[in-house]
Image: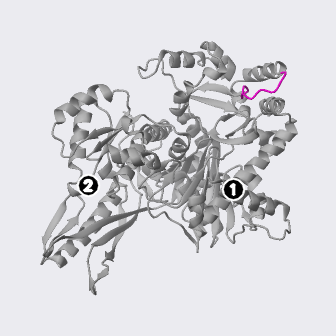
């Protein structure tokens, strides 16, 4: 059997054809991700695969870092959060720690809702600027989200906006975390829909009719239809795919899988041959979610991270920009713009004037943007503009461009600038594009900072190595010594890592010295990682492994996954002063009630609900062949020499495969 794996990252789209019988990669390709039109990059990478093998493939599996990058870069669709039964004061106190918007931007409904007519009138004006809505009800498990469903019905009927109900995504109690998870899901709807529709359209034009599956954040697979409703489950699917490939290719008992892409570096931990999973849900950036997945630490560092400067010198920003060498390949006129900038730069300048704005989406007909925003985008329509020229086009100076932040966050415009990818071209480590634009960008940065082009290159590489070391050290400390986590961001913590780094670099034999080491191998995934990982591994006292197919490992990981589901069902006693009154089983579609004499019946029902829920979710994700088991855990502390039953949790575990004919509907008409 043969399958296609495609990974769409922030910079490159990779593809492989994998033979499951021989465990071989039969064909592979790599092409630039084209954010303005994803179909171009997807089509380009398929062109590099064997046409005959493409026709023999039986399914297509996808992974992507689009959702990850959207979180790190703060972009995505406009989503409104509706809280039902949640106190605004509670949100006011904790919203920032969960990645939630300020309470003034959230719509609050009391529970029970007494007047749906008022809600319907309110949303007609206040919800018009949003692309989607997330609805989250407190204690929704008690009524299976009845109020969430009613609110969704009204919004869809009144405004025809897609809605996400928190209870249908996650059944956990923490309503703020459920709100964060649901809101993020709503924001990612347009991001993932655009990706999947692009895939389908490319396949359709090539006459390929294949079942499509998508990697989840836990490394398992889900159907296309399920993905369209649960895009938040793709949150770390790109890193999860790389973990699957890294473990498959290297067979290391203990390892850090280090996947460096264009926008982010994702790090996973393999301990005793098994990837470590998260217990309470994935956190990324400011977002705290209930998304189950493999443990992945994501930080902003990649081949396309912006290299910028301020009064303290060079630094590597978390923001992704288009490398100047890539921009010049498509728009050669940028070269003359950069040459002109260097000619008239006579003194140090602390503004990154070599950066350019690029238009990604046409907003000329959208009522959601101001006249100034539309004029700015209109100025970029014919070609990208250097930052000062773009400002001049709308009658502003470079210090008056704060209004572009929203356009950048929403993926309407993007910047190009000097990046590690440019430095790789200048040093001969990468040679896909003409390095002239890279040299001009580095020369301008040198004029502003007082360094030569060679000096800029050396500093940039050192900054990448140091940032990679600091983050790997942070991850190791957090994993083995969690008490360090509360110190993150403090002066003490930063100085501690700095001392460890300097000791590792100099091998100084002081009266005492700090040296952080690990027995875990560093397994490198991604195109640029081989340039930096060996040096960082030496600093950590370990070895670096770059497996075969490392540049396309995410696509390989996508191809080799299976489908797996866990579905927990809680059984809880209801106590009164007289003892247990009844037992509640929070089932798949309803809450079941059992009298105090029917504990065994309640247990049997909970087990069946767990089994049924796991199978239903597995089938919903597209599996056709499966096996299912149920695990039980009991919480019953001893009080006054007697066990006090607090709850029993029955967890259905189902595993299957997605093969055969696709039952998914197209994303587009």
Main secondary structure type of the part rendered in magenta? loop
Q: Which residue is mark 2?
A: 139
Q: Is residue 578 left or right of residue 523?
A: left
Q: Nearer the viewer, residue 660 or 367?
A: 367
Query: According to the image, label 1 marks what residue?
Result: 470
Q: Secondary structure at mark 1?
A: helix
Distance between mark 2 and mark 1 Cα atoms: 41 Å
Instruction: Report the residue at 32% width, 65% height from top.
Output: 568
Residue 560 in the image, given as x and y percentages of width and height: 53, 60
Binning the other alpha carbons within 10 Å of mark 1 as few (below 14), some (14 to 19) or many (20 upward) gives: some
In screen coordinates, is 31 left or right of 82? right
Return the residue nearer the eye: 661 or 74: 74
Q: Depth check: give the residue in front, 622 or 520.
A: 520
Query: Does the image show residue 23?
Result: no
Residue in the foreground of this view, choosing between 8 and 438: 438
Q: Is residue 567 left or right of residue 576?
A: right
Up-down relation of residue 108 to residue 365 (above or below) = below
Q: Is residue 617 left or right of residue 531?
A: left
- Quarter holding residue 449: top right
Q: Sequence-wise, which precedes: disc 2 or disc 1?
A: 2
> Looking at the image, is 555 positioned above or below residue 163?
below
The residue stretch that appears in magenta: 346-354
Q: Please identify the quadrant where the C terminus is shown.
A: top left
Above or below, comparing residue 636 to residue 355 in the picture: below
Q: Secondary structure at mark 2?
A: loop
């Amino acid at each position: 059997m043969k399958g296609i794996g495609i990974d769409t990252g922030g910079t490159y789209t990779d593809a492989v054809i994998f033979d499951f019988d021989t465990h071989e990669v039969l064909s592979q390709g790599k092409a630039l991700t084209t954010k303005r039109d994803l179909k171009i990059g997807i089509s380009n990478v398929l062109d590099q695969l064997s046409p005959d093998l493409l026709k023999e493939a039986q399914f297509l599996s996808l992974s992507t870092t689009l959702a990850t990058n959207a979180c790190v870069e703060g972009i995505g669709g406009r989503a409104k959060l509706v809280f039902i039964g949640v106190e605004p004061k509670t949100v006011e106190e904790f919203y920032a720690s969960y990645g939630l918007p300020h309470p003034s931007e959230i719509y609050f409904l009391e529970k029970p809702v007494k007047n749906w007519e008022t809600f319907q009138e309110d949303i007609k004006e206040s919800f018009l600027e949003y692309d989607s809505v997330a609805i989250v009800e407190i204690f929704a498990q008690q009524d299976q989200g009845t109020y969430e469903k009613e609110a969704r019905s009204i919004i869809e009927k009144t405004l025809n906006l897609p809605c996400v109900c928190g209870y249908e995504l996650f059944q956990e109690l923490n309503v703020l975390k459920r709100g964060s998870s649901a809101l993020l899901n709503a924001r990612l709807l347009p991001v993932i829909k655009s990706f999947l529709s692009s895939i389908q359209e490319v396949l359709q034009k090539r006459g390929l009719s294949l079942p499509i599956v998508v990697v989840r954040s836990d490394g398992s697979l889900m159907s296309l239809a399920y993905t369209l409703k649960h895009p938040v489950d793709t949150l770390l699917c790109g890193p999860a795919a790389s973990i699957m490939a890294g473990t498959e290719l290297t067979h290391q008992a203990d390892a850090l899988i280090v996947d460096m892409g264009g926008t982010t570096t994702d790090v996973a931990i393999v301990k005793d041959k098994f990837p470590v999973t998260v217990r309470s849900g994935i956190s990324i950036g400011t977002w705290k979610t209930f998304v189950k997945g493999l443990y992945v630490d994501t930080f902003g560092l990649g081949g396309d991270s912006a290299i910028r400067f301020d009064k303290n010198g060079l630094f590597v920003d978390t923001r992704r920009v288009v490398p100047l060498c890539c921009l010049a390949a498509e728009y050669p006129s940028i070269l003359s713009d950069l040459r002109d900038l260097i000619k008239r730069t006579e003194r140090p300048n602390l503004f990154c004037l070599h950066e350019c704005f690029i238009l990604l989406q046409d907003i000329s007909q959208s009522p959601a943007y101001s006249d100034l925003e539309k004029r700015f985008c209109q100025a970029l329509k014919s070609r990208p503009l250097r930052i000062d020229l773009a400002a001049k086009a709308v009658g502003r100076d470079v210090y008056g461009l704060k209004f572009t932040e929203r356009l950048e966050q929403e993926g309407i415009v993007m910047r190009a600038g000097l990046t590690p990818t440019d430095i790789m071209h200048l040093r001969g480590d990468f040679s896909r594009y003409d390095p002239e634009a890279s040299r001009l960008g580095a020369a301008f940065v040198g004029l502003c900072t007082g360094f030569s082009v060679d000096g800029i290159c050396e500093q940039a590489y050192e900054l990448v190595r140091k940032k990679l070391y600091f983050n790997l050290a942070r991850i190791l400390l957090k994993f083995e010594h969690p008490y360090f986590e509360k110190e993150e961001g403090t002066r003490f913590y930063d100085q501690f890592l700095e001392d460890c780094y300097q000791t590792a670099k100099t091998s100084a034999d002081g009266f005492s010295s700090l040296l952080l080491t690990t027995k875990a191998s560093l397994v490198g995934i991604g195109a640029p990682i081989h340039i930096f990982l060996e040096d960082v591994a030496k600093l950590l006292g370990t070895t670096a492994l770059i497996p075969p197919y490392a540049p396309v490992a995410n696509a390989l990981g996508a191809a080799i996954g299976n489908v797996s589901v866990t579905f927990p069902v809680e059984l809880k006693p209801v106590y009164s002063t007289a003892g247990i009154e009844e037992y509640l089983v929070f089932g798949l579609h309803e809450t079941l009630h059992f009298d105090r004499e029917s504990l065994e019946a309640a247990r049997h029902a909970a087990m069946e609900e767990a089994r049924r829920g796991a199978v239903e979710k597995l089938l919903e994700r597209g599996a056709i062949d499966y096996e299912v088991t149920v695990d039980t855990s009991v919480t019953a502390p001893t009080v006054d020499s007697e066990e006090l039953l607090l709850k029993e949790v029955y967890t259905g575990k189902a595993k299957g495969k997605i093969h055969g004919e696709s039952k998914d509907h197209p994303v587009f008409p």
